[in-house]
């Protein structure tokens, strides 16, 4: 055997199903950039790439913490003042049965840690389809088979209860709810949350409620601004971990600050919470100085959110209007976060659509198959964070591409 082959180090087989949607596209975008074109990035959910600014008082809090020498390891569950502020936030969300709260390096770490602390080999948890790809990546990493339930496009992307019941097995330990949702921008109704709680009760499931976008709720086209419903507020008795963080609501994704709020019956969640703390201790701590921004963020002025939601509403409306007026495109209007997940009626895969769109019109969106979707359907995810001028240029490019490649259908 040639030496080069013998020396090749292969990655673990269990990673084979980890999806690389965004990275695959980056290679195509690099090609186009090398040819001298500027790619319009409607693919990355980082507000700081666009006209959004971190509230200055929280930057000052971290700066002060660093100057004050808070640069060593922090306590593993987080600094006490941050944990207290997170408990206060839980109370504002209406969660009355908080049993624990801890700080992590972004919600990404909360997801990894909470799933790792729960699921044994041979067991599974239900994840939404489409989903935020980190969930399936963590499950692949743990060697846990995916068990995805459908979100119903015909019902504003609400979870399909019948599919959940169908997918549940005796080995299902938990269920993930992403609300508001990435990639669809949908918001769960109170009735849906109540029905999910009923299923969780009946099947003794832990609920992972990812609420990282809970302050980015947009009114619908009639101006109806139904508020966000926290799962744990509706189901105080159900074992639940509510995921929250600073990346999106407080415009600091690079700080890597998230948290978990454990709620439910105290005795029931105790052993699981102890397992989580074992993992929290093993990884030492979350970023230390950044934790000093949690209290001022959650308890200080929230003015920036008014401006963020104003911009997002205008950009969502523009996106929705474009979807409604463009042949072969339809879209459930997003109600939260900054994503739209339009459906496209085309005779080829959405992955080809997206790659050719980058090559020909230099607009970058992510294909629906990168998030999971029902067989036979095609979608793409738009991040509508860019300003109106950029979005208008990008949407004109996508419309031209559809017309030139597929006709108006
Ligand atoms: C639904 C959802 N959960 C979690 C995360 C990860 O967030 P963090 O930056 O806190 O790790 C994201 C990031 O885009 C997300 O969309």
Image (spheres, rainbow, N blue to C red):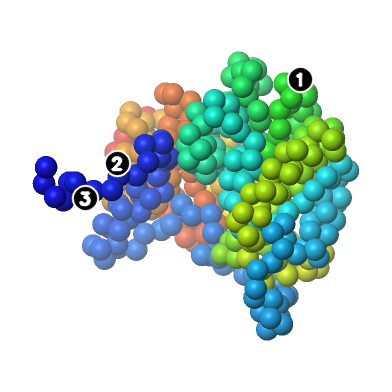
Residue beneath label 3, please?
7
Pointer 1: residues within 10 angstroms few (<14), some, or many (20+)?
Answer: few
Answer whether residue 60 is visible to the viewer in this image: no
Q: Secondary structure at mark 3?
A: loop
- Classify 127 as above or below 25: above
The residue positioned 59% from the left and 41% from the top of the image is 116
Q: Quick one: 390 or 59, which is closer to the camera?
A: 59
Q: Secondary structure at mark 2?
A: helix
Q: Is residue 47 left or right of residue 354?
A: right
- Classify 41 as above or below 224: below
Q: Quick one: 134 or 335, which is closer to the camera?
A: 134
Q: Quick one: 328 or 168, which is closer to the camera?
A: 168
> Given this view, does label 3 or label 1 mark the residue nearer the observer?
3
Pointer 3: residues within 10 angstroms few (<14), some, or many (20+)?
Answer: few
Residue beneath label 2, please?
404
The residue positioned 78% from the left and 24% from the top of the image is 201
Label drawn at residue 202: 1
- Label 3, label 1: how many angstroms apart (C-alpha)? 52 Å
Q: Is mark 2 within 8 Å of ligand 1?
A: no
Label drawn at residue 130: none
> Given this view, does label 1 or label 2 mark the residue nearer the observer?
1
Name which of mark 1 and mark 2 comes first in the sequence.
1
Name which of mark 3 and mark 1 comes first in the sequence.
3
Quarter containing the C terminus: top left
């Amino acid at each position: 055997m040639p030496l080069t082959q013998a020396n090749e180090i292969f990655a673990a087989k269990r990673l084979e199903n980890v999806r690389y949607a965004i990275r695959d596209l980056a290679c195509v975008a690099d090609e186009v950039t090398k040819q001298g074109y500027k790619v319009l990035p409607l693919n990355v959910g980082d507000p700081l790439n666009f006209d959004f600014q971190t509230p200055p008082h929280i930057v000052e809090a971290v700066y002060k913490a660093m100057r004050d020498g808070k640069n060593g390891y922090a306590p593993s569950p987080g600094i006490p003042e941050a944990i207290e502020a997170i408990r206060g936030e839980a109370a504002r969300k209406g969660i009355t049965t908080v049993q624990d709260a801890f700080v992590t390096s972004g919600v990404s770490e909360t997801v990894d840690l909470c799933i790792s602390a729960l699921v044994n080999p041979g067991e599974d948890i239900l994840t939404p389809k489409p989903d935020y790809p980190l969930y399936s990546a963590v499950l692949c990493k743990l060697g846990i088979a995916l068990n995805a339930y459908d979100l119903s496009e015909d019902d504003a992307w609400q979870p399909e209860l019948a599919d959940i019941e169908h997918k549940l097995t005796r080995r299902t330990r938990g269920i993930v709810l992403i609300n508001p949702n990435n990639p669809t921008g949908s918001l769960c109704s109170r009735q849906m949350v109540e029905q999910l709680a009923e299923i969780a009760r009946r099947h003794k499931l832990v609920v992972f409620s990812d609420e990282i976008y809970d302050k980015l709720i947009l009114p619908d086209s009639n101006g109806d601004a139904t508020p966000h419903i926290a799962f744990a507020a509706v189901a105080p008795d159900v074992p639940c971990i509510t995921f929250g963080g600073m990346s999106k609501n407080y415009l600091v994704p690079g700080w890597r600050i998230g948290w978990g709020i454990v709620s439910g019956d105290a005795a029931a969640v105790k052993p699981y919470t102890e397992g989580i703390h074992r993992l929290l201790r093993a990884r030492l701590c979350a970023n230390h100085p950044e934790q000093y921004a949690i209290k001022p963020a959650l308890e200080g002025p929230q003015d920036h959110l008014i401006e963020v939601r104003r911009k997002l509403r205008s950009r969502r409306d523009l996106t929705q209007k474009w979807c409604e007026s463009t042949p072969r495109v339809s879209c459930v209007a997003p109600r939260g976060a900054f994503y739209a997940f339009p459906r496209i009626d085309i005779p080829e895969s959405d992955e080809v659509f997206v790659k050719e769109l980058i090559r020909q019109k230099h607009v970058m969106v992510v294909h629906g198959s990168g998030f999971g979707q029902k067989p036979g359907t095609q979608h793409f995810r738009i991040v509508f964070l860019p300003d109106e001028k950029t979005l208008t240029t990008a949407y004109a490019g996508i419309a031209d591409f559809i017309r030139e490649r597929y006709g108006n259908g």
